[in-house]
Amino acid sequence: MDERIGNAAALSAAADKVKREIFLRDAQNYILRVTSRITGGPVTTSDEEWPVALLAVSEALDAYDEDKGNFWSFAGVVIKNRLMDMYRKNERHRAEISVRPEAFGGDVDEDDPDFALQMEMRGRLGVSDENTLREEILSLQEELSEYGISFFELTEVSPKAEKTRSGCAGLIASLFAPPPPLTGKLKKTKNLPVQEMLSRFKISRKIVERYRKYLIASALILDGDYPGLASYLGYAKEAIKSLGRA
C-alpha cells in the first residue's frame, strides 16, 4: 500500500464517519495481514483477534497525525497493544474461572473501562460462538446507524470510571422500568427520553448528554436480539434486575 495514499486516506477517514467505514471495509485484508504478522500465524475474520484489530485501527485513525509517520506502522503498534491486552485478560479470566466459575455467569470484563473493546473480545468463555457474535456486531452497527451512531465511536463515548459506569447503568435501567418502559419511545423518536429518565433516576443531566451514544447502544443491545453482546453489560443487567425485570 502506497504510504502517501495510505496516510492521506487515514487522515480523511478520521474526519468523516462515512469515509471511516469505507476505509475500514476496504482495508480489511490489509488489517488481517498486519494482524497475522503480529500474531505470527494466519488470522481471519472468524478469529477473536479480528474485531480487536479492527477497533484498534479505528482507534489509530483518531490518534493519527502526519508527525507519527506511516499510518500503518502506527496502527500496527496500536493493534499489537490491544491484542496484548486481550491475551492478558483472557489468561486472567481463565485463572479466575478455574477457581469460581459461578462468579462470572457470562458477565465478562465488567470492570473493563473500554466498553467497545470489551464487547468485541469474546475470549474463550463460551458466551457466544464467533460467527454469531460477529453477526450481532454487524446487526447492531446497522441499527445504530439509524441513530446517527457509528459502532466504532463507542470506544470514545464509553464511561471509564467505575462510578460513572454505575451511574450510566442506573440510567439504562430507567429505560426499562415500568410503568411504562421507555425503550419504545426511544426507538420511535430515535432520541433518549431524557426528562422521563431523570425523573426515574436522579443524576446530572450532563451525564446523560455526555454518554448519550453509550446509553442508546446499551439499551438497544439489552432490548434487542443480542445475547452475546448483552452478556458483557453486567452493570446494566444487574441494575435492571434490581427493578424487577428478569
Image: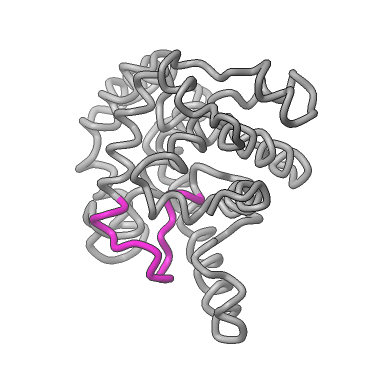
State which region is magenta: 118-133
Depth order, front residue of 178/205: 178
Which quadrant of the figure has residue 74? top left
User: Going 61% across and 52% down the picture, which residue do you hit?
Assistant: 241
Depth order, front residue of 85/175: 175
Depth order, front residue of 245/47: 245
| Residue 140 x %, y % | 34, 36
| Residue 83 x %, y % | 45, 57
Q: Is residue 63 visible?
A: no
Which quadrant of the figure has residue 165? top right
Picture quarter with the N terminus: top left
Q: Report the side of 168 relative to 54 (left or right).
A: right
Position of residue 95 relative to residue 54, above or below, is: below
| Residue 201 x %, y % | 74, 31
Q: Report the side of 152 relative to 244 (left or right).
A: left
Does the stretch in magenta take in 120?
A: yes
Q: Is residue 103 visible?
A: yes
Position of residue 72 relative to residue 5, above or below, is: below
Residue at the far front in the pictured view: 179
Does the stretch in magenta take in 244?
A: no
Which quadrant of the figure has residue 195? top right
Residue at the far bottom in the pictured view: 99
Depth order, front residue of 201/31: 201
| Residue 141 x %, y % | 34, 32
User: Going 57% across and 31% down the picture, which residue do you hit?
Assistant: 215
